[in-house]
Amino acid sequence: MAELERPGRGALAVGLAFAVLTLAWPFVEERLAAELGVRALAFAFLAATIGSLFVARSGLPRDLSLGPLDSAAFIGLPLAAVLTGERAFLLLFPAWLYAALARIFAASLRGGGSLVERAALRLEPFAPAAIIRPYCRGVTAFWAAVFLVNALGIAALALFAPPAWWRAYTGWICWLVFAALSAVEFVVRKVHFRNYDGGPIDSAFEFFFPADGNEMGRRANAYKGEMRRAQGRPERGRSR
């Protein structure tokens, strides 16, 4: 299975810029459009997007790179706004960003290992790939679906709803949804693997869901113990 490559510095900077833009866009788009005009804002956005895509293409790992359709849309949306003066094309930017994320996550399911699995193995190099693979594939597919549904919802709000609804959803509601889903996934993961390393959160989970309470917990903790002994590391955590 191919290891998840590290992005270059330029790609990391572009990724951070896109993340900041995604967070700030719902709050600044309307004001910027009013002050600069839709066409001027779209032209500036188009120039920044072309430069960002050029840097990202040379620095992003292949697994995380944007496809031709993604790149065409990121250029086409501000270009359409320049030509027509319609704000709706600028409001569609977050929708296409989430659609691109959905495609990247889904595409990784067809390769040698899902995106979540490769990220997990980078964080925990000695995690048992055979044990975590089915769960990681499920989580990858789950987030691909979440991003796709989110993209469709944002597109519908941009095209058919009042701008205030779009601004509220993209500005904070969708992040609350993501936070809630992440919390649910964390609980499901803890209950599924029951791999504890101490601390108040692990202690609470272990009280209600003992490490030896299911087959997965016994397998995961036995493997963890073997790896620690092989590395000469002290035993940690509790497994009853």
Image: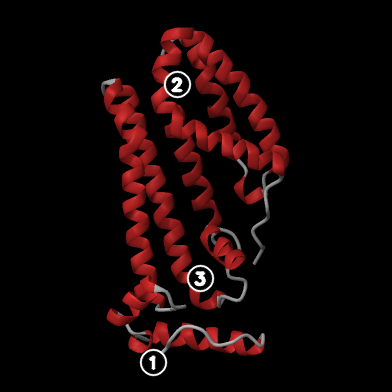
User: As displayed, is residue 46 above or below residue 190?
Assistant: above
* Residue 7 pos. (x, y %): 67, 48
At mark 3, the secondary structure is helix
User: As displayed, is residue 22 above or below residue 64?
Assistant: above
User: As displayed, is residue 182 above or below residue 227?
Assistant: above
- Judge from the rendering whether residue 9 lies leftward or rightward of residue 120; answer left or right: right
* Residue 50 pos. (x, y %): 64, 25
Question: Counting other residues with Cα less than 10 Å from the Cα at mark 1, is it few (<14), some (14-19), or many (20 or more)?
Answer: few
* Circle on res. 214: none
Which amino acid is tagged 3?
Arg
Location of the C terminus by quadrant is bottom left
- Based on the displayed image, in which of its 4 quarters is residue 148 positioned? top left
* Residue 121 pos. (x, y %): 59, 67
At mark 2, the secondary structure is helix
Q: CA distance from mark 2 to mark 1?
A: 56 Å
Q: Which residue is mark 2?
A: 90
Which amino acid is tagged 2?
Leu
* Residue 215 pos. (x, y %): 39, 86
Question: Counting other residues with Cα less than 10 Å from the Cα at mark 3, is it few (<14), some (14-19), or many (20 or more)?
Answer: some
Query: Residue 49 or 108: which is nearer the viewer?
Result: 49
* Circle on res. 133: 3
Earlier residue among tags 3 and 2: 2
Location of the N terminus by quadrant is bottom right
* Circle on res. 240: 1
- Give me the residue at 71% from left, 43% from top: 9
Q: CA distance from mark 1 to mark 3?
A: 25 Å
Q: CA distance from mark 3 to mark 2?
A: 38 Å
Does residue 67 appear in the picture of this structure? Answer: no
Earlier residue among tags 2 and 1: 2
Question: Counting other residues with Cα less than 10 Å from the Cα at mark 2, is it few (<14), some (14-19), or many (20 or more)?
Answer: many
- Give me the residue at 56% from left, 13% from top: 43
